[in-house]
Amino acid sequence: MLRIKNSVLGALAVAATLVLPAAHAAGTLDELLEQTKNVRAREAQANQARVAKFQQQRNEQAALLGQARNELAQQNARSAALSAQFDANEKKLTELQAALDARVGNLGEVFGVTRQIAGDVSSVLFNSLISAEYPKRDEAIAKMAQAKALPSIAELETLWFEMQREMTETGRVARFKAPVVNPDGEAEEQEIVRVGGFNAVADDQYLNYLPALKQLAIQPRQPGHYTGYAGDLLDADEGYVETAVDPTRGVMLSLYSQRPTTWERIEKGELVGYIILLVGLAGTIAAVVQFLHLIKVRAAVRTQLTRLDNPTTDNPLGRVLSSFKGDAAKLDEDAEVVELRISEAVLREVPGLERFQAFLKLSVAAGPLLGLIGTVIGMIVTFQSITESGSSDPKLMANGISQAMIATVLGLGIAIPLLFANAVLQSISRSIVQILDEQSTGLLAERLEAKRRA
């Protein structure tokens, strides 16, 4: 095969020589024969070099294959040794675990109980207001709750200490400094007074504990008049002071803070509520003005009662007495005419004494009616919310129901006080009118008797 290949290569070389340009072409047959010999010699030399290279590469591959087989044998032997060692270790571990379980005995139950208690205590400490004064104290307890090994004596003592400190601090009022997050989100160190694990105050404001941040934050809305107690608590150095304590650790105080103020409740009534308040304000002003007027008139009438023989025109009784006193022509008239004139004088004073009472009666009647209108509007809003949302979610219905109830309360709120005010004004005015009737009738009777005697 090699010989055939060499012959073909030689022929190709001769052919290549024959097609060379004229500058390299042989001039004679002898030169051509010599060139052909040289070409064949070079081809033979190149072929021998290739064969030597191929043989060298084959030997190298054979050597590498031998090395790989030796290494494979070594790895197989090592694998067998490791497998035997693994089986031996497994057996030893089983024996050691059995020995450990035998030695542990009841400590396994103690470990389970410890993990459970540590988990409960960790949750309590995480949400406790006291952690604002002692931060990061729940982390060690949380690690103990997640541990997979028996706790050490030091860890058990830490658990006991934190439980004891939580109980002790719950009954103490402490003063300390710590960062406080204001409503703008910025933390500023302030002096804090903590009432057990229930409340914390700073800068005359109540604080909320943020477990995720382990910081105290000012409540966005303060609980109304209870805010004054916070200032008293901060200013106290010793003794006893009155303050608000939330046994739910801030939950009830936060809910109380969300209660709307009086003006916010009034705003829920919207336009109808403002109209009711306007009517109530007008009625109140009228009642106060008329009350002061009647008090002044009653005082003047009582003064006039002490000097009936000298009537003055600055009070109703004096004007009634002056209507016929001292006029002889009036005494000569019939008794019926004189009585009618006296009644006329009394009736002339009645409108001033009963001023604004009609308006008060109208306000008393209009208050509940306006409240009823607000109630109907609120229920319409409620049903609209149900229709638009397709559900009866209480939060969606709360706005309309609140508007309905506020309007009703405002209507009754102005009607009831104005009803009592009108009753008081009527009582005072009637007492004055009764005095006018009594005195005028008595005066008439006295004059008729005197006339008969004459």
Image: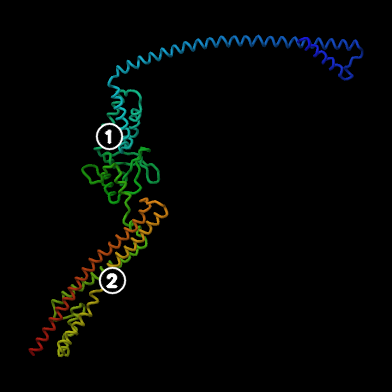
- Residue on which disc 2 sits: 359
Which quadrant holds the C terminus?
bottom left
**Figure check: 71 above or below 305:** above
Q: Give the quarter of the image for residue 428.
A: bottom left
Would you identify the image quadrant in which residue 294 lies? bottom left
Whole-percent x, y for residue 33 in the image: 88, 10
Q: In this figure, what is the number of numbered marks?
A: 2
Query: In this rendering, does residue 446 appear at all?
Result: yes
Please, is residue 448 above or below residue 424 in the view? below
First in residue order: circle 2 vs circle 1 = 1
In the rendered structure, find residue 166 and report the number of the disc placed on it.
1
Front-lying residue, 164 or 361: 361
CA distance separating discs 2 and 1: 65 Å
Select label 2 or label 1 by which is in front. Answer: 2
In this rendered view, identify the residue nearer to me: 329 or 407: 407
Q: Which mark is residue 313?
A: none
What SS does tag 2 mark? helix
- Report the side of 167 relative to 190 (left or right): left
Is 84 situated left or right of 67 in this image?
A: left
Residue drawn at x 85%, y 16% as measured from the top left: 17
Where is residue 37? Give x, y as percent: 84, 10
Tell me the quadrant of the picture where the N terminus can be found.
Answer: top right
**Amino acid type shown at disc 1:** Glu
Q: Secondary structure at mark 1?
A: helix
- Mark 2 residue crowding within 10 angstroms, few (<14) / some (14–19) / many (20+): some
Indicate the quadrant where residue 188 lies. Answer: top left
